[in-house]
Amino acid sequence: MSRRSSRPRQTSATSTRIAPVTALAPASPCPCGLSATYADCCGRLHAGAAAPTCEALMRSRYAAFVVQDAAYLLRTWHPDTRPSVIDFDPAMRWVRLEILATTDGSAFHTTGTVTFRAHYTDNGRPDSLHEQSRFVRHEGAWVYSAAVFAD
């Protein structure tokens, strides 16, 4: 996921694990929208488990935006397209993820796409991001490669 407008604050990323800005309790509902707890869902991926599908990676990346986990986002971004830093807008709050479609992206594929709508508020105003994200396998793991904005 990305955002078209600029952000005033930048978060530096390093190879060292940086604690997310917004922590979630392990028993909290996972922000990705599945019925599992954060610890049993995206929290395990943020802690180092591999995503089994590109949809699981997409959901975990959305959750990483919710908790502002820049290290995870960079770790799961293809090195050819990965930025040097992740910027988080302090006025932006991610509120809901809708998965609209997926193509390929299972254990039997090397590429896949996930089309989604991510709902957020920006300075209290509701909006959404409609995107088709592309994922590839890199060194055996699913990584985010690029996106096309659908709106």
Image (spheres, rainbow, N blue to C red):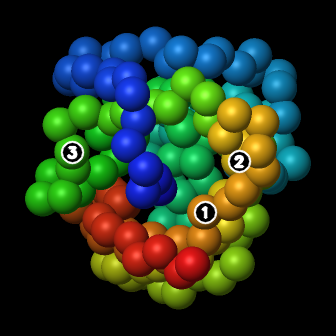
Q: Residues within 10 Å of mark 1 (few under 14, many from 20)?
A: some
Query: Would residue 57 be found to the left or right of residue 34 on screen?
Result: left
Query: In the rendered image, which residue does mark 3 sit on?
Result: 83
Pair 3/2: label in front: 2
Q: Is residue 139 visible?
A: no
Marks 2,1: beta carbons within 8 A: yes
| Residue 40, quarter of picture | top right
Q: 57 or 95, which lies in front? A: 95
Quadrant assignment for the C terminus: bottom right
Q: Is residue 43 left or right of residue 18?
A: right
Q: Looking at the image, is 112 positioned above or below residue 61?
A: below
| Residue 90, image x, y percentages | 56, 25
Give the residue drawn at x 21%, y 45%.
83
Residue 9 or residue 51, whichever sits in front: 9
Q: Say left or right for 73 vs 25.
A: left
Q: Secondary structure at mark 3?
A: loop
Residue drawn at (72%, 56%) of the image:
127
User: In the current view of this chain or complex, which residue is farthest to the bottom?
Assistant: 103
The secondary structure type at the circle numbered 2 is strand
**Where on the picture, by quarter, is residue 7?**
top left
Q: Residues within 10 Å of mark 3 (few under 14, many from 20)?
A: few
Instruction: Locate residue 87, reporting x and y percent.
Output: 37, 33
Numbered circles on residues, count: 3
Q: Earlier in the sequence, mark 3 or mark 2?
A: 3
Residue position marked by numbered label 1 in the rendering:
129
Q: Earlier in the sequence, mark 1 or mark 3?
A: 3
- Residue 26, image quadrant: top right
User: Can you give x and y, in whole percent of width and height, for residue 134 in the image?
Assistant: 39, 73
Callout 1, which amino acid?
A: Leu
